[in-house]
Image (cartoon, rainbow, N blue to C red):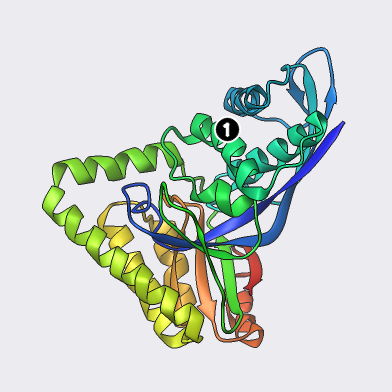
Amino acid sequence: MGEGVGYAKTILFGEHFVVQGSHAIGASLSKEFSVKITPSEKLSLNIETGQIVLDASRAILDSFSLPENYFIEAETGIPSGAGMGWSAAYSVALARAAAAEKGARLDWKEIAKHAYEGEKVFHGNPSGIDNTLASRKGAILFKRGEEPIPINLKVPLNLVIAYTGKTGYTKELVSGVARVKEEKPEAFADLMREVEAIVVEARTCLREGNLGRLGVLMDKNQECLRQVGVSSPELEELISMFKDEGALGAKLTGSGGGGCAIALVRSKNDTSAILQRIGNKYLIFEAQIG
């Protein structure tokens, strides 16, 4: 029997544009996906999933040269399709379980590579940031094809994460952004430059603890995401509520099209007004990073 865990994540800056070559900043969350695998007559899971999860599971097991006859016992509190990295956390957890089954002692980078095989099945052309975040704790600066760089935060980030209840389909949304790039290359290039500048400045703000400016940058990033068509009425309603209750900044996180929005607040005490206003309408998580 092999066991493993993977972490939920949030993208703070740069989602979607990271697929096209920009930098992004993300962080792992405390919510986990846990997986146990035991030999069985056929590949199966204890949770109700679609064929794509079985196909991704096969890809990960194949990357370890393991047979496909395992019973996978999975447990998580991460909502699926919410932009919190359900598929990446599952892929990492299964990769760790497979490594344990093989008796292989792998570091997080090697685990992330195996998990990427599953992510390709789930999403087609993923950047790799989700499986990287799901395999380690902390915040990172990420660019496709480059070594991720840990970011040391001067002060903790207090976030409120709210789920719209509407699923965002990553593969379709990524394809939609690619169409925008193809149809409006000059406008898209301008957005890429803007997002890259936002990410670079945000990294400095995280190191210096400049929360006020960080919130402004989150708002700027959200405007860029609107322009490539990945926001939604549900997300915009959440973001407006966050801002009305004094959030420093707010944006969608992950693929968009639904899923989750995040808000940056100064302290845990500042989350109370937000929770009182929208706590009965949305599934809400509080998170502290750093």
Tell me where residue 81 appears, x and y as whole percent: 55, 45
The N terminus lies in which quarter of the figure? top right
The C terminus lies in which quarter of the figure? bottom right
Which residue lies at the image location 47% right of the left edge and 74% below the top edge? Answer: 241
Which residue lies at the image location 58% right of the left edge and 71% below the top edge? Answer: 160
Tell me where residue 116 appears, x and y as whole percent: 55, 37
Which residue lies at the image location 36% right of the left edge and 76% below the top edge? Answer: 201
Under circle 1, the secondary element is helix
Residue 275 drawn above or below residue 269: above
Tell me where residue 265 appears, x and y as whole percent: 54, 81
Q: Closest to the observer: 236 or 216?
A: 216
The picture quadrant where one finds residue 37 is top right
Whether residue 245 appears in this view of the structure is no
Circle 1 crowding by C-alpha within 10 Å: few under 14, some 14–19, many from 20: many
Q: Closest to the observer: 243 or 14?
A: 14
Whether residue 237 appears in this view of the structure is yes
Q: Is residue 115 left or right of residue 39?
A: left
Q: Is residue 39 left or right of residue 56?
A: right
Q: Closest to the observer: 282 or 43?
A: 43
Residue under label 1, please give it: 118
